[in-house]
Amino acid sequence: MKIFNLFFCVCFILFAALQYNDPDPYVWVPLYLYAAFLCWKASKEMFYQTAYLVGIGIYSIYAVYKAFDANGLIDWLKFHHAENLAGTMKAETPWVEETREFFALIILIAVLAINYFNGKKKAKATN
């Protein structure tokens, strides 16, 4: 799990750094850095169950918003026939940006959930 957490810590820091030209870096930089911090702590065998749940909750609420937002995931699937999101790195259409953000949130949720359950398992094993 140490390599897993160090990998995602570095990835999330890089993702945060790449937000400089995003229309809403004030949202995404803290979202990525929060997860990076928790991954860093988990790599040191420090698990913060409440912090994982808070992050998962916030990311989940935002993901639901992104899914149902105009130009979000549902719009992409329904009206744009799941058009390729990775054809170019430039988000030339609004649904590309919104859908990519949705999937970024899913990755953040998955990583925090893995750490949450791993931390619970470790806590149970020590008791």
Image (spheres, rainbow, N blue to C red):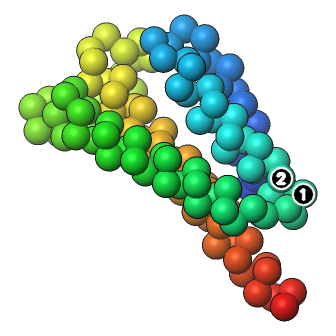
Vertical placement of 89 versus 101: above or below?
above
Q: Which residue is mark 1?
A: 44
The residue lying at 14 percent from left, 29 percent from top is: 80
Local secondary structure at mark 1? loop
For disc 2, the marked residue is 41
Q: Position of residue 67 (x, y in %)?
A: 28, 41
* Quadrant of the frame with the C terminus: bottom right
User: Could you tell me if residue 7 is visible in this image?
Assistant: no
Q: Looking at the image, which residue is at 78% across and 64% down?
A: 47
Three-letter residue code for mark 2 = Lys
The amino acid at mark 1 is Lys
Q: Nearer the viewer, residue 87 or 27?
A: 27
Side of 44 where 24 appears, left or right:
left
What distance separates the C-alpha of mark 2 from that of mark 1? 5 Å
Q: Residue at x 81, y 88 (%)?
A: 125
Looking at the rendered image, the quarter that the N terminus falls into is bottom right
Location of residue 46 with respect to 77 vertically, above or below: below
* x and y percentages locating residue 11 in the rendered image: 69, 36
Q: Give percent across and percent down for residue 31.
A: 59, 35
Marks 2 & 1, CB-CB < 8 Å contact: yes
